[in-house]
Structure formats: structure tokens, C-alpha cells
Image: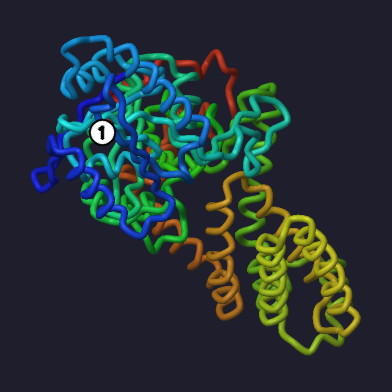
Amino acid sequence: MSDQRTSRPDDSRLTVDGSQNLTAMKAIFDHCEDIAFDEWTFGDRFEHNVFTVHCGTLVKDRNKNHLSSTLLDASRSLAANEQLTPEFIGHYFHNQGMTSQPFKLSNSLTETADLVLEGFIALFFDGWNHSICYYTRGIEKRAVMESIGEPVVQGPREGTNESLSTNLGMIRQRVKTPKLKVEVITAGSSLKTKIAYLYLQDATDPELLLEFRSRIQGIEEYEVLGTSYVEDWIEDSSYSPFPQYRYTERTDNAASALLDGKILVLTDNSPMILICPSLFVDFFGTSEDYYVRTVFASLIRLLRLFAFFIALVLPSLYIALSTYHPELIPTVLLLTILDSREGIPFPAFFEALAMEVSFELLREAGIRLPRPVGSAVSIVGALVIGQAAITAQIASPIMVIIVALTGIASFAIPHYDMAIALRIVRFPLMIAAGILGGFGLMIGFLLILLHLTRLHTLGQPYLSSLAPIKFRNFRDIFVRFPLRHLLVSPRNRKLMKIRQKGS
């Protein structure tokens, strides 16, 4: 396949003088030891000169050797032509092709150099002011394997890797329709990172797509290393602890989001797929919810919702009740708590704060250390520190239980970004409960709710699935209705959204 690129006005053009083109390319790649130049001649009297440029760290030797041998074979067959000219040779290779690999035709030095750095072999003929660039990239990439961050018991095991073309191919394999649109932009003058965004034409709201395009404008001028850079560029509130977009490494999740009218963002050299927009309720579902029976999926979702509230309020609720409102605790439980706290020199707030900080340190150490060591450090550290704190009467057993339950509940949140948000919000609630008790806890809840109601994701209200209250919207939030009630064509889903806007 061929693709004629449009050169920029300031690009320097190739000339018919092959030696001048060779000198210019060597000047561009000065002090680039991984760039290789190969020169040879062909023809009856070896009167025709040709040279190639490629990056040795991106192109495998077998690809380069195959291209060279194919070029020489074609040259011998063309040498029988009495009117053999460099122009004829160039047009022959451009029109007929000589390999099964994709190629591009260029008349710009800058564009050819960019293609060489993408894994192309650039072919130059003396007497022809164009280069033919064949894609023969052979750098090793991580194989397609199961997603580590989103494991499932039932369902597909296919996960993304760091190759943009591979990820796009896996999504295209699932969504086999020309209405799946893929648009690619290039960001940065040095990195030249390819950013692709995908949407389903029938399902995506045109206003949402217009808003996304307006926000992503200008990112081409900056260096982008990964998908998170795009998230930070387009999000509504960078200082909110709650994530406005979610990530996935599973292609079935990506396909489901496309059918739901979402926009996907992928970047080269990053396995993460950004789903835009993402509402608050989207962070409590997983792909496995649709591969198991309805009753089990609904119970698991309710359990995740319960875990969310435990991870958010359990330490602060304990601080408020034990410090300011002991009369609300049953007498037997209160006597047990008082007995366990006998001899503890710190108030409940400082005790909970110290234990929570210690648990967060252990969790972060377990993540950053090598995997075989990290799990051992987190488990042994928690056991040793917890037991030592109880023995030294620095912390009570009930506090160790509360901190452990809070940590386990945060692990039950399926999306890591939402779990981080809970870890951040938990500490201000503890401070409010330590200062004002239940009244402070109520103020903290109201402030969080006020923030969530004011928060937007790509222009849409963050809590739009919860308010205004409509029974139809609750079929796939806290519980999951049978799939026969949820399966809606993208076009009908789009019409439903338009009607909801009108109402």
C-alpha cells in the first residue's frame, strides 16, 4: 500500500543529485551511530547508483537483507531494458512495488528522516528526486498476554501491549464495522508520539466528539510520553482527587465502551487505553460482570459499593464514635473497646493516623519493590508492625482490625484510580472527625457530595447516571439486569440519549 504524505513548507526537498542527497542525510544523522548507509551500483556497466538509509536498532538484519536482495534481483531484470533511466527505475519501484511491506513515497529530507526513525528503510536513486521508504521495523515488543491489572475468572484473556498498531488491530478485530473511526495525531518535535482516538460513529454524541477535539487541540506542540499525559491535558479538574477518566488494558472493555458511545485514546509505547468520559458509577463495574450470571454479578456490585463506604469512612467513624459519641456504641462493645485501649498513650485520632500512614507506607513499598519481594514485605511488615504495636501498647487491637478492614475494602475497588481517591479523601475525613466528631464527619460528607455534583467529565456531570433519578438508568449500576434487557444497538442508544437530553 502507498501513502503520499504532504510535506511542510519549510521541509528541504530532495534533488536529482544522489550524492547531494546522501550528504544531506548524513548531515541530518550526524553522530547517530545506529543509522546505517549502504551504497551500491547496478546496470550493464554499473552506471546507476543507489543508496539506502535505515536505523539498525529498529530494522532487523533479515528484513534489510531481504530488501537488498529483492532490489538487486529487480535491478537485473530491469537492466535488460534499453531505456533504463533512474526516473524509470524509481517509477517502476513506486508503481509496481517490490516487497509485501507497506511503503511511502517522499520528496522531503525531513519526512524521509522521520520515516527512517519509525523503522522504514529509505531507498534513493541517483537522478530521481524522491525516496521510497519501506516499512521493515523489527524491534521486539511485549507479546499479547493477559492483563495484570484486570484479571478475570471468566472471559477473554487478551490484553494490550506497547504497540499502537497491535492494540488498534485487536480493537478493530472486535469491532468489525467501517463506522469505527480512527484518527491519529503526532505530538512533540522530538518524541513524535502517535496519539490515536477512536469512536463509533452511530454511538458517539457529536457534541461530545466536538468537545473532545477542542480540548485535545494544541497537544501536538508538546512531548507526550504516555496516555496519562493526554488525560491530564483534557480533564476538567486536575486538582480533584476523583478520576474523571478510566483506564483499561482489556480489548473487550474497550469494545464495550465504544458501543456505549465513549471515546478511546491510545498512545504509542503505552498499553493503557483511556476511556472518555467516565462517570462516577463506571468505576464500580468490571468486564467480568457480563460474563457471570445476573444474581452473582449484582451481589458482587453491591459488595463493591459496601467496600467503597468502608474504605471511605470506617476509621473516621471509629474516631468520632469512640471520642465524641460513646453513648451510640452498644455497652458490651464499648467495654471491649475501652478494655483494648487501656494503657494506650495516644488519643484515637493519632492512633488511627499513625496506623493508616504505616499501612500506606507498607502498601507503597510492596508496589515499588520487585514482585517476589514486594508481597513478602507487605505481608510480613503488616504482621510484624501490627503485633509489635499491640505489644508495645502503641495501638489497640481494635484499631489494627479497623485499619486492616479499611485496606482490604480499598483493594476491592476494581479501578486503581478510584482506590487512590479514597486513600486521599480518607485523611481529611479523619481530621474532621477528630476535631468535631460526628458533626465534622457530616460536614466532610456534604463537602464531598458538593464536589462530586460540581465535577464534570468531558463536559458531562460526574453524577449524571444517578440524578435525575430514572429507573431505566439503574438497570446497570448497583445491580445488573439480565443481558437481554441491556443489549441495545448503538444507534438506538444514541437516540435514547438525545431523547433524555430533550426531556
Q: Residue at x 12, y 38 (%)?
A: 15
Kindly tell me whether residue 496 is visible in this rendering.
no
Occupied quadrant, residue 331: bottom right
Closest to the observer: 417 or 192?
Answer: 192
Q: Residue at x 36, y 23 (%)?
A: 102
Query: Residue 317: x, y in percent?
Result: 65, 66
Label 1 sits on residue: 124
Instruction: Tell me: residue 330, above or below residue 88.
Output: below
Instruction: Tell me: residue 315, above or below residue 202.
Output: below
Query: Residue 55: x, y in percent?
Result: 41, 44
**What is the residue that sits farthest to the bottom in this orientation?**
345
Occupied quadrant, residue 264: top left
Q: Quadrant of the C terminus?
A: top left
Q: Does 299 sit left or right of 4 as displayed?
A: right
Instruction: Tell me: residue 346, above or below residue 11.
Output: below
Q: Residue at x 43, y 14 (%)?
A: 176
Query: Residue 377: x, y in percent?
Result: 79, 65
Scheme of colours in the image: rainbow
Query: Residue 407: x, y in percent?
Result: 71, 59
Occupied quadrant, residue 150: top right
Closest to the observer: 40 or 474?
Answer: 40
